[in-house]
Amino acid sequence: MGPFDDDLTRFAAHGAEPLPAAVEDGHVEHDGARIWYAAFGAGTPVILLHGGLGHSGNWGNQVPALMSAGYRPIVIDSRGHGRSTRDAQPYAYTRMASDVRAVMDALHIDRAAFIGWSDGACVALILAMQTPERATGVFFFGCNMDPTGARPFSPTPVIDRCFERHRKDYTALSSTPDDFDAFVAAVTEMMQTQPNATAAELAATRVPVTIVQSEHDEFIRPEHAHYLARTLPDAQFVLLPGVSHFAPLQRPALFNAAVLAFLHGLLQQ
């Protein structure tokens, strides 16, 4: 196969590239859940937050690139996703942001840059809005900050392949492997009703943010991405050509170049 996986055939069959050996991994007990994390390499910490229904293994194309550039990538499975557990509390992006802070506290990380993909982007931006002192910047890829930013759902073969990969990975990793359908229903309810950030709340954000939108994103309205870039006071807009909501898997080199440019920009500030 070539370097691209635009139709996610490779991802559907095998998943993302495996993560390298971690320097440290484990669980943090927080708010009724056990949150799994893994840290790699050394240097400035960069926290990667995956998309809804996925898990940290989907960053397998990004972690080595960050290590090679001298960063310390840290991945976290959102509560109820991957190797992380959850209790009966409903899913909430604010609760997931609190989980991330708990992992940072356990690892003695005062501040970090955040790379967020889809739901992970929402979690990262909410964390930065709530506690700006913990975030040096947010790379916000492929997400909305109020329900009007989402496109009406329309299934495609690419989405179907990704969904079936999520099902396989959930069964393999979760402590409740038979509960995938209930998991999807609970996460979908969160996605359809949250977040609800107002323009005033966005305008009050005091953290550098790069809004990253794919040319062919299946879930996010392009005008919403532009609205976020206009409304957040210290924001830039980046368009990724030729890819969709799954750019980190489809064309890793393109996505990684945008991530590294974002991180380099933070160093210049």
Image (cartoon, helix red, strand yellow):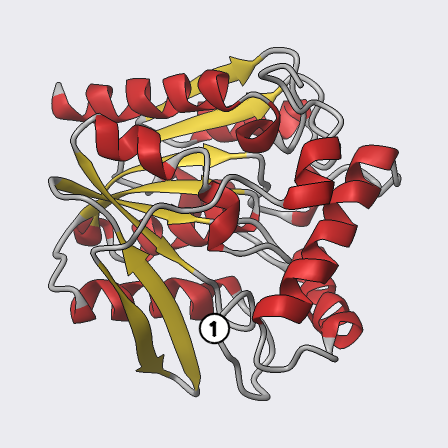
Residue located at (76% from left, 76% from top): 182
Q: Percent x, y for residue 121?
A: 47, 44
Viewer-closest of 13 and 4: 13
Left/right of residue 113 with respect to residue 79 in the rendered view: left
* Rendered view: 183 above or below 68: below
Q: What type is the residue that disc 1 sits on?
A: Ser
**Going by the image, does 135 lie left or right of 218?**
left
Instruction: Give the camera-side residue of 135 and 216.
Output: 216
Splitting the image into 4 quarters, where does residue 171 fall? bottom right
**Residue at x 75%, y 33% (from the top left corner):** 9
Q: Quadrant of residue 22?
A: bottom left
Q: Can you say which quadrant of the picture contains the N terminus?
A: top right
Up the image or down, 129 lies above or below 168; here it is above
From the viewer's perspective, tell me whether residue 190 is left or right of residue 257.
right
Furthest residue toward top: 241
Quadrant location, the C terminus: top left
The percent coordinates of residue 160 (x first, y second) are 83, 44
The residue that label 1 is drawn on is 84
Q: Position of residue 154 (x, y in %)?
A: 88, 39
Q: Residue at x 71, y 51 (%)?
A: 165
Residue 198 showing in the rendered view? no
Q: Residue at x 43, y 87 (%)?
A: 32
SS of the residue under disc 1: loop
Which residue in the rendered view is the most extreme toward the front? 1
Q: In this view of the protein, can residue 34 be seen by the observer?
A: yes
Q: How many numbered dots are placed on residues in this image?
A: 1
Circle 1 residues within 10 Å: few <14, some 14–19, many ≥20:
many
